[in-house]
Image (tube, grey):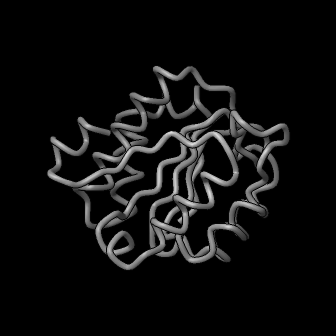
């Protein structure tokens, strides 16, 4: 994230989150007006499972439905990206419901078990495209053109 911040001149905030309580706290902070106006990307980098993320300090996976409920309006008009294994695996309808009900601008993530180095490379390219393109279609067209093989390997999916 530091690279993206320096390359594109945007602010970023990095937080390690291990528990549901910590996640709720930070989601609440990021839903405040000053954050909503200045941070257009919510980047979730956790271990994952089908339609879920795994918080280190919790025994149970956190389902995307539950995340949407506790996040309230924090996802609204933002790119929401899950850089985690298999989080967008499963029914596309569930992902579409999350995107629509959360009012996210874009929902994206991976459907396969991912190598963290490969996903980091893809995430850097993805965010770079997102930050320099004015049209969402151009973001995904350029990603496919330049990183299509990597997207296939990772099982990259997006909903816009």
Residue at point 39%, 28% (across, down): 121
Location of the N terminus (image quadrant): top left
Residue 77: x and y in percent read 46, 74
| 17 sits left or right of 105 in the view | right
- Residue, x 70% and y 51% (percent of image)? 20
Tell me which residue sits at (21%, 54%) in the image.
10
Work out whether residue 142 or residue 113 is closer to the camera in this orientation and state it.
Answer: 113
Q: Is residue 128 left or right of residue 101?
A: left
How many marks do you count on the picture? 0
User: Residue 140: x and y, percent?
Assistant: 42, 52
Position above or below: 44 against 74: above
Q: Seen from this angle, which residue lies furthest right?
A: 60
Q: Quadrant of residue 59?
A: top right
Q: Is residue 154 above or below residue 51?
A: above
In the rendered image, the vertical position of residue 70 relative to residue 2, given as above or below: below
Residue at x 69% of width, y 31% of height: 112
Residue 29 horizontal/vertical position (percent): 47, 66
- Please name whichever residue, 110 or 151, is drawn nearer the observer in this view of the structure: 110
Q: Is residue 95 left or right of residue 45?
A: right
Residue 106 x/y as whole percent: 50, 63
């Amino acid at each position: 994230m530091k690279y993206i911040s320096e390359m594109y001149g945007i602010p970023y905030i990095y937080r390690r989150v291990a528990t549901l309580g910590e996640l709720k706290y930070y989601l609440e902070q990021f839903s405040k007006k000053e954050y909503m106006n200045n941070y257009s990307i919510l980047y979730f980098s956790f271990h994952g499972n089908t339609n879920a993320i795994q918080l280190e300090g919790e025994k149970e996976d956190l389902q995307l439905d539950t995340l949407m409920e506790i996040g309230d309006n924090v996802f609204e008009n933002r790119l929401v990206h899950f850089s985690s294994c298999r989080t967008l695996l499963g029914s596309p309808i569930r992902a579409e419901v999350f995107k629509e009900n959360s009012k996210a601008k874009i929902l994206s993530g991976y459907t396969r078990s991912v190598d963290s180095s490969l996903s980091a490379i893809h995430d850097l390219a993805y965010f770079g495209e997102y930050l320099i393109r004015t049209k969402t279609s151009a973001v995904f067209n350029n990603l496919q053109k330049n990183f299509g093989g990597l997207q296939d390997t990772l099982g990259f999916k997006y909903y816009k």
